[in-house]
């Protein structure tokens, strides 16, 4: 099939492509400008309004214009320093980015299937407690990471996924609206987890109300300890397998590109190259990386909490993109979300799709909780006041990214950096870090309502129909 | 004409019988709840305890019911409002701050009791206005700029967290003078002397009375006045309403702003009726629970009140259980209101169908 198309008079096709290509390129450039300009202006305007708010609140108490201006500058300088340049500032921002990526991916899956999973926070908690339990089972303590880590991650995904499957089932079977049920499940999750932490799963030896710490083999690796970890050949093997898998996917994608697809036509040859590349990457990792990391490793600061969860997050984003836009399953999910009746008439199983979407969404949230326990919490366990508030921010992140997995990575980083920088801002300038919520809200507002930004900066609107397409569907229909 | 009256008549009777069925179900539910409660706490819930629990139920249900009414008003006109939580938070903070501030101004000029009353009512007004200010943003963004209403509501929530938290930290966190306190219980003259019902219904604080009144007002306005008919038609089929000469945008603006007013009352509950302190995030999801009550009640005020009452009952029973049975881990009964809501929703109510144009921006052709 591919042979026939490529034998076609390629010069003619190329000529026509060239003319169209130029036009397309210009269109693409304009689109890029349009796509980048508005968010950037939105962010700029939000920070500007934030500055005005800081200025006036400072002016009310001090009545000094220069002093108030100074406060504004100090606040934003502190925010920037805290988020990026302070010692470990950047890595802490990335640490805060990871749960955001997973949670908003979960929300995006829900939104795409027409479900507003407002309960990601509860699923996050359930994923975390599942991991804290499975990761601390005495009989499993000596398992190597190559087995244990996948097991605990699976436990986290299952914890969140099953918790979300309940509202999914109720929605599909009885029509109970997921916004109510997931919201209620949130509160039930908080109480339930609180009960588990202070009762059955409590670490009896600790004075604090917390669970037992998870086993060493179950923990997610900090970047600083990777050389240490790779001394164990089993760990190196695990990493090699993961990287080989990524290389395999990458090579397949590479051979799918138009230029390469034309050049190499033999499928057997393609398969050989793909597998060969994957094996090569795997072997190199297995043999080379442990040695290399002992000789030279860029992450030496052992207090740096940066961990490989970030890469899991990036992989999850690619996975969600692939799932939603490249598979039949994703097509069904999106169809159910876009038009339930059309999906039903096309013979799609609505019940199955709703339950699947909810479970996947919850699994993502559960993974976020799992990583929080396995890599971020200082005791590697779950405490009574577990870091939270991620869930509601994630609604904003998913909406800001318009449910695009790659946009989610960027906006998660934006939110993570702000969340992390806020502490130093408050410390340096005395401006409450709640100003960050204000800025986040304004960014979302300006992105959601482009006419406002256009009106402020007198930008003419290019009427494009896809911009008008709704992102969410109100209550998701009946 | 005759057919219209006839069908109207049929509608009335059917809705009347439905109401009766609902009342019977609610009564059975209440008795069952009482029986279960006594089973758990060993039969210690006598007359006084029942009265106390029921009166408490209405108290806990007040902000949730008000939040739900805000949702009903907005969504009957076709505007989804998930920003109720944010408006409540805003109103709670503004109510608290203004209450303190006005009391400081007036306390030396008149006797403290009347200064307190004055400052509380002014604070209530300010709280309502602040919520309406936020709501105006939601209205303009979702009606004029036609942006996604879920996003717009989320924006309201985030902005409110930011604004209230920021102002609280900058101005209200430290060095505060003593405030005038919350609204006292007001016994309705005469009615509060009725043996049991008086204790339950007529020894409440002002916002609870306002909530009682609003149920009837909203029910009447939405279903028995031309304006209500217009609102509902805009929520179901704005194009058709527009063709009939109804100003869709105006109806939506008015409904949404009234919703904002009610959300302000719901928020004021926390600092002017509940407790005399403010802390960031103190509404704790009540706005969302209000939305749940609204969906539970199928976008009807009485249904929404029912939803809120179930929740309030769960909360007050929880309190009773934790008094009589300290040996049960407190988290288990605390889950009760939420579990109850899910069970009732999934088992009894089932599929709730929103107004047809809910969440869709209207574009004039």
Image (cartoon, coloured by chain):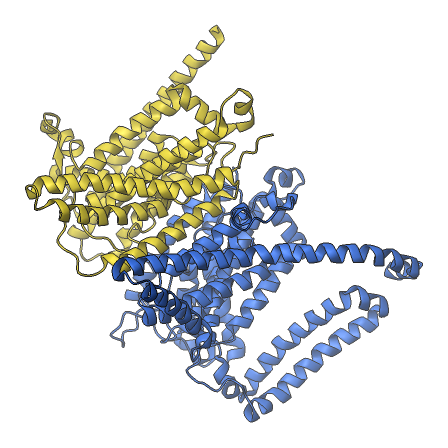
Chain colours: A blue, B yellow
Q: Give the x, y percent position of residue B273.
A: 20, 43
- Where on the picture, by quarter, is residue B190? top left
Report the side of B94 relative to A47 (left or right): left
Report the side of A270 relative to A229 (left or right): right
Above or below, comparing residue B160 to residue A234 in the picture: above
Q: Give the x, y percent position of residue A287.
A: 63, 88
Above or below, comparing residue A87 to residue A166 in the picture: below
Q: In percent of the image, x 64 and y 60: which residue is there?
A: A322
Q: In percent of the image, x 17 and y 57: which residue is there?
A: B176
Q: Give the x, y percent position of residue B222.
A: 38, 25
Q: In percent of the image, x 16 and y 47: which residue is there?
A: B42
Above or below, comparing residue A24 to residue A209 in the picture: above
Q: Residue furthest bottom?
A: A295
- Where on the picture, by quarter, is residue A124? bottom left
Above or below, comparing residue A1 to residue A344 in the picture: below
- Where on the picture, by quarter, is residue A242? bottom right
Q: Give the x, y percent position of residue B207.
A: 22, 37
Determine if residue A386 is in view: no
């Amino acid at each position: 099939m591919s042979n026939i198309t490529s034998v076609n008079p390629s010069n003619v096709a190329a000529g026509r492509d060239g003319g169209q290509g130029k036009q397309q390129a210009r269109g693409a450039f304009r689109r890029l400008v349009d796509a980048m300009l508005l968010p950037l202006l939105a962010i700029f305007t939000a920070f500007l309004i934030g500055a005005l708010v800081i200025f006036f609140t400072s002016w009310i108490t001090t009545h000094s214009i220069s002093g108030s201006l100074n406060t504004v500058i100090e606040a934003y300088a502190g925010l920037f320093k805290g988020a990026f340049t302070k010692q470990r500032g950047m890595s802490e921002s990335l640490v805060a980015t990871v749960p955001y990526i997973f949670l908003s991916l979960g929300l995006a899956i829900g939104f795409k299937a027409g479900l507003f999973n407002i309960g990601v926070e509860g699923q996050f908690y359930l994923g975390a407690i599942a991991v804290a339990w499975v990761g601390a089972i005495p009989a499993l303590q000596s398992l190597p990471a190559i087995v244990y880590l996948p097991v605990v991650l699976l436990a986290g995904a299952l914890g969140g996924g099953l918790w979300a499957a309940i509202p999914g089932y109720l929605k599909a079977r009885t029509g109970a609206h997921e916004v109510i049920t997931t919201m209620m499940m949130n509160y039930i999750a908080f109480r339930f987890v609180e009960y588990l932490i202070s009762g059955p799963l409590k670490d009896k030896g600790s004075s604090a109300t917390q669970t037992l710490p998870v086993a060493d083999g179950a923990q997610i690796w900090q970047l600083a300890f990777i050389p240490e970890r790779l001394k164990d050949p089993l760990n190196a093997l695990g990493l090699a397998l993961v990287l080989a898998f990524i290389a395999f996917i990458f090579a397949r994608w590479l051979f799918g590109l138009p230029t390469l697809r034309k050049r190499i036509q033999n499928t057997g040859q393609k398969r050989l190259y793909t597998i060969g590349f994957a094996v090569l990457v795997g072997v190199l990792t297995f043999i080379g990386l442990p040695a290399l990391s002992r000789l030279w490793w860029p992450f030496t600061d052992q207090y740096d909490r940066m961990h490989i969860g970030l890469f899991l997050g990036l992989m999850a984003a690619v996975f969600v993109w692939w799932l939603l836009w490249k598979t039949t399953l994703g097509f069904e999910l999106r169809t159910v979300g876009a038009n339930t009746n059309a999906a039903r008439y096309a013979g799609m199983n609505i019940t199955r799709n709703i339950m699947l979407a909810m479970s996947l969404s919850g699994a993502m949230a559960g993974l976020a909780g799992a990583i929080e326990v396995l890599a971020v919490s200082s005791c590697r366990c779950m405490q009574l006041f577990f870091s939270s508030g991620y869930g509601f921010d994630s609604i904003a992140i998913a909406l800001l990214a318009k449910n695009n997995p790659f946009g989610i990575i960027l906006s998660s980083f934006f939110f993570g950096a702000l969340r992390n920088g806020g502490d130093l801002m408050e410390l340096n300038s005395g401006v409450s870090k709640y100003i960050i919520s204000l800025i986040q809200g304004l960014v979302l507002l300006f992105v959601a309502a482009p006419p406002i930004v256009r009106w402020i900066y007198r930008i003419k609107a290019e009427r494009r129909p896809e911009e008008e397409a709704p992102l969410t569907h109100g209550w998701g229909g009946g | 004409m005759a057919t219209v009256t006839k069908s109207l008549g049929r509608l009335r009777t059917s809705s009347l019988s439905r109401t009766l069925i609902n009342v019977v179900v609610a009564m059975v539910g209440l008795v069952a709840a009482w029986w279960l409660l006594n089973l758990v706490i060993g039969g210690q819930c006598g007359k006084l305890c029942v009265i106390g629990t029921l009166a408490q139920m209405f108290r806990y249900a007040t902000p949730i019911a008000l939040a739900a009414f805000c949702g009903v008003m907005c969504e009957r006109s076709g505007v989804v409002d998930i920003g109720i939580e944010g408006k409540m938070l805003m109103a709670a903070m503004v109510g608290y701050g203004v209450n303190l501030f006005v009391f400081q101004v007036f306390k030396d000029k008149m006797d403290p009791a009347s200064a307190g009353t004055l400052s509380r009512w002014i604070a209530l007004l300010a709280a309502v206005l602040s919520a309406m200010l936020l709501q105006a943003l939601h209205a303009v963004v979702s009606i004029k700029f036609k942006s996604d209403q879920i996003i717009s509501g989320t924006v309201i929530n985030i902005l409110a967290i930011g604004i209230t938290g920021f102002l609280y930290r900058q101005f209200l966190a430290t060095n505060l003078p003593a405030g005038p306190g919350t609204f006292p219980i007001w016994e309705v003259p005469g009615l509060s002397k009725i043996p049991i019902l008086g204790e339950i219904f007529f020894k409440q604080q002002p916002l609870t009375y306002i909530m009682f009144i609003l149920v009837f007002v909203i029910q009447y306005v939405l279903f028995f006045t031309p304006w209500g008919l217009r609102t509902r038609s805009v929520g179901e089929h704005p194009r058709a309403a527009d063709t009939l000469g109804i100003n869709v945008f105006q109806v939506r603006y008015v409904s949404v702003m009234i919703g904002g007013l009610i959300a302000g009352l719901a928020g004021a509950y926390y600092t002017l009726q509940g407790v005399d302190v403010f802390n960031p995030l103190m509404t704790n999801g009540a706005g969302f629970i209000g939305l749940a009550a609204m969906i539970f009640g199928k976008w009807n005020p009485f249904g929404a009140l029912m939803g809120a009452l179930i929740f309030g009952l769960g909360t007050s029973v929880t309190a009773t259980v934790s008094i009589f049975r300290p040996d049960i881990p407190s988290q288990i009964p605390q889950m009760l209101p939420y579990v109850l809501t899910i069970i009732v929703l999934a088992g009894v109510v089932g599929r709730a169908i929103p107004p047809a144009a809910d969440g869709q921006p209207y574009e004039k052709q």
